[in-house]
Image (cartoon, rainbow, N blue to C red):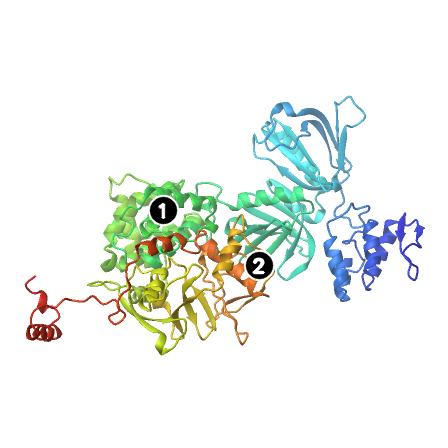
Amino acid sequence: QVITRRRGLSPPQMISLTVSMHCVHSALCINVQSSDVCETLALVFCGADVSCDTGDPELPSPIALAQHHGQNLQLELLMQNRNTGVRLGEHRVHYMAPPSVTHNGFLFKTGSMSVRLCLLEFSRRWCVLNDGNFSYYESDKNATPNGGLKMKEIVCLAVSPPETHGYDHTFELYSDAERLYLFGTDNPETMREWVKSIAKSFIPAGAEHLLLKDFERIGRLRYKDRLNREMSRLGWFCLVGSNLHIRLEEHTADETIDLQKLLELSIQPENEVLVLVERGRTLYIEGERKLDFLGWAAAIQRNAGSSGDTLSQQQLTEADIPVIVERCIHFTTQYGLTSEGIYRKSGVNSKIAALLEEFRRDARCVWLKEGEHQMDDVSNVLKRFFRGIEEGLFGLEAHSWLSATDESSRICQYRLLFSNLPRVNQATLRALVNHLYCVQRFADLNQMNLHNLAIVFGPTLFQADGKDYSAGRVIEDLIQHYVTIFDVNEQQLKKQLDEITYIIKLRDNLAPKAGTGSGDFICTVYLEKKKETAEQHVKIPATMTAAELTFEILDRRKISVKEKDYWCCFEVNEKEEMERPLHYLEKVLPIFHSLGTDSHLLVKKHFSMEAMLVYLASKVEVSKHGMMKFREERSLLGFCSPFSTSKWPVKCLKVYHGMKKKLRPPTWYLCCDTQNEMREWFATFMSIQNGGRVWPAEWLKSRVASCSAPLDTRFGNVSLIPLRGSENEMRNSVAAFTADPLALFRNV
């Protein structure tokens, strides 16, 4: 019986009608095209399925109908009620159970939902699968089942890893009523037969190719993609190792996602969505029920990580190179090609082990940064990874590489052996030898020539003890004949070397120069406002922090700091009309070198700092969420943003704030509705980036206690030489010093 409100009658005047669910769904499809939200709500409360079939292939659901007719309020109501309520009828048939699938036998069943179970928690049951119904009995003598479920109620079938739940072999059945059924057996053949029979009974004919795979999890999920995020659709998913095989609703062929090559994998727990980002595509996966979704999310996240110790079991890039190898090579190329003894020097063992463990746990989440990671630690992580990899970089045929002795035929033999390597080994060896070739090209700077690199990497890559130089000879040949062995385009190689040369020159220009007062530069800093009377010319050593610069300026102007005064050094960009307060521990000299012609350093009071500190003090843990307007622009060169996904590493960001007169945003522009909201977001970013250290309260106390009298502003901070003697002697000394500044120290 359905209670519905008739048009034109007041709410108390109701009429009771007996109708079929087909009529309810038809009424829902008609009503969502109008603005009567109350009628739609009443139909939903009576059991109408918001995903029912409309009979129109172009607009297959009420959601599509509401969207087509521009009923945004109706659309929102339907979307909010998409997975709620008990479905009293299913007009849409996901599959047709093959009547020929029958199976029976003894299984061990448990009603417990513990993470790990023991044998005593299982009971032996006689189980029967027949005509799309699965039933279990006390024994094979009983005629009345203890329980059961219909195959159309199953949303997922999962095969547990061996010995997960007491028995060697167990499988799980998830129903759309949020129930989990767990069965076990000691016989692997028995479990395979049951799993195959049950899967055949609930997987539709359109996705039957998934049954041919040795899956560990199979079932139906709802999904969205970047092109259509308003309406979720049905898909059949099959997880086999690191590969996720999919039969999507609108496609006629199976698709495969290599989980180890994902650019990003994240979970949105608030709305139970798993986000899979690969090159050129983003897939949003939703579970039909929470229990089912959590199982899929855990399995996909586990299989997307490194699954073993061979190269092919690592998290890989799109080019089939392990992520750990690519990121270590990239870091070394950016910051280490001029480091003397690179790959020969040892790092800090504890830091090397910790960084290697981070990569093994989830390489996608490890970002190497200058200052935070040391060059020698990163280079040793790469060597330790190759030494510990199972089967080695050269695979099972490593001895064939070492046995090549004839110098005239070695190159041809290397080419043949390289072509026989597995795909991942080929890509990794090519990338590593390319990197070592670039390293030895700059041997005049890093002292690592061809021979030195061969001594280091020969025993490492062949996992040998280093007593025999045959391993080093192979590496030396590969580097020396890199172009020939790997069929390298010489123009592309020259372009790569030119880019590296440019990076080195750029870093040399930004680096402090050696000599007396090494790293000191005379910089212009402004106090409170950019004008001539506020200019201060300061000698900034390489070690000077933003806090030290700030109080150097205040001391010169003899400005006393009161308790609630929060003086900071700001990086100001006049053209973009934005600014960034420097963290008090941030080194000033690199910031100064990176400033453009439209930027300058400014010391002024940070009027938002007190409110930021109060906000952070009220937080139990540093996190924030909320709605912000977002806009991203492509660079002038047309390159795509490295942050094109929905997840940004906060520690890699530089966060500016300001009010722009014209909407011409920087690359990533986040807009807040109020200044208070902007302060809270900025405080959160700053706290996360600096480990909770936002303001140097303790440092200020110690500074005030030990502070000496300020320097005489007439002389700035220039060191003075005392002159003694008569007036004529002092005049002669000054004249001599002007002609030759070192003359006074010749006899010292």
Q: Nearer the viewer, residue 418 or 631?
A: 631
Circle 1 residue = 381
Residue 188 in picture, x, y percent from top left? 60, 30
Circle 2 residue = 281
Numbered label attached to residue 675: none
Q: Nearer the viewer, residue 35 or 746?
A: 746
Q: Secondary structure at mark 1?
A: helix
Residue 178 in picture, x, y percent from top left? 71, 40
> Could you tell me which residue is drawn at 33 percent across and 58 percent down?
335
Looking at the image, residue 734 sits to the left or right of residue 247; the answer is left
Question: In the picture, residue 485 is in which quadrant?
Answer: bottom left
Q: Secondary structure at mark 2?
A: strand
Circle 2 residues within 10 Å: few <14, some 14–19, many ≥20: few
Classify the position of the C terminus by image quarter: bottom left
Looking at the image, residue 100 sits to the left or right of residue 253; the answer is right
- What is the C-alpha distance between the residues marked 1 and 2? 32 Å
